[in-house]
């Protein structure tokens, strides 16, 4: 299992130093980009993603918490990102499958209160599924649904899923072993990694 560090939990005034001070605690950087409409935050700026892409060697996982991904995706494709998450609640995923390639994994995110069965029509087209366990937009929240239970619900609905599972939101250190045993490939943590 890989640990992805959600940089939404860093000190924004000292972001790069905060990342570097904690780099032994994670494998991937998870970057939330938001439009202020899909969820009530602006997340991380495209400028910050561009800087991280050009000035660091971290693997970058970008999570688009936006209503219109096409406004962002073309610019992101010119950056050094390894995975990109869109949301089942805001896009017709089949329109974005063309962006997948050998260097970019394309996944679908699902909010904690959205029925897992909503993924049925598109699940075979995804490289991974991002299971959110909190309402998106802010770090250090209590879970809406347990990361363990949300993963089990997904596995009960899609036991033969060929992609990988990523879990985000209120993932505590004590969840890591059980999530790994359930087959989760990426666990996203924010406040569990970054001390402000």
Image: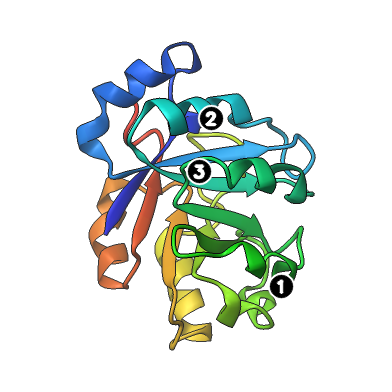
Q: Residues within 10 Å of mark 2 (few under 14, many from 20)?
A: some
Mark 1 and mark 3: Cα distance apart in space: 32 Å
Q: Residues within 10 Å of mark 1 (few under 14, many from 20)?
A: few
Q: Quadrant of residue 184?
A: bottom left
Camera-nearest label, 1 or 3: 1
* Left or right: 95, with 157 as reference point: right
Question: Who comes first in sequence, dot 1 or dot 2?
Answer: 2
Q: Examine the rendering and report whether any part of residue 195 can be seen.
A: no
Q: Is residue 122 above or below residue 101?
A: below
Q: Position of residue 144 (x, y in %)?
A: 56, 53
Mark 2 and mark 3: Cα distance apart in space: 30 Å
Q: Position of residue 156 (x, y in %)?
A: 47, 84
For label 1, the residue is 94
Mark 1 and mark 2: Cα distance apart in space: 27 Å
Give SS at disc 3.
Answer: loop
For label 3, the residue is 142
Give SS at disc 2.
Answer: helix
Residue sitting nearer the eye, 49 or 35 = 49
For label 2, the residue is 50
* Left or right: 96, with 165 as reference point: right
Residue drawn at (40%, 48%), measured in percent from left and top? 188
Residue sitting nearer the eye, 17 or 196 = 17
User: The C terminus is located in which quarter?
Assistant: top left
């Amino acid at each position: 299992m890989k640990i992805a560090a959600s940089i939404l939990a860093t000190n924004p005034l000292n972001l790069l130093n905060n990342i570097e001070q904690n780099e032994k605690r994670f494998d991937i950087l998870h970057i939330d980009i938001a439009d202020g409409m899909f969820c009530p935050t602006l997340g991380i700026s495209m400028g910050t993603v561009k800087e991280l892409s050009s000035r660091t060697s971290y693997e970058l996982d970008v999570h688009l918490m936006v209503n219109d991904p096409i406004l962002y995706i073309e610019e992101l494709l010119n950056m050094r990102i390894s995975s990109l998450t869109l949301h089942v609640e805001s896009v017709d995923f089949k329109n974005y499958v063309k962006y997948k390639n050998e260097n970019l994994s394309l996944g679908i995110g699902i909010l904690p209160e959205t029925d897992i069965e909503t993924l049925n029509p598109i699940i075979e087209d995804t490289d991974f599924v991002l299971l959110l366990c909190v309402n998106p937009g802010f770090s250090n929240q209590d879970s809406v649904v347990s990361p363990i239970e949300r993963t089990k619900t997904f596995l009960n609905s899609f036991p033969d899923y060929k992609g990988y599972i990523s879990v985000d939101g209120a993932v505590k250190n004590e969840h890591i072993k059980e999530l790994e045993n359930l087959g989760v490939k990426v666990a996203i943590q924010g406040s569990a990694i970054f001390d402000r």
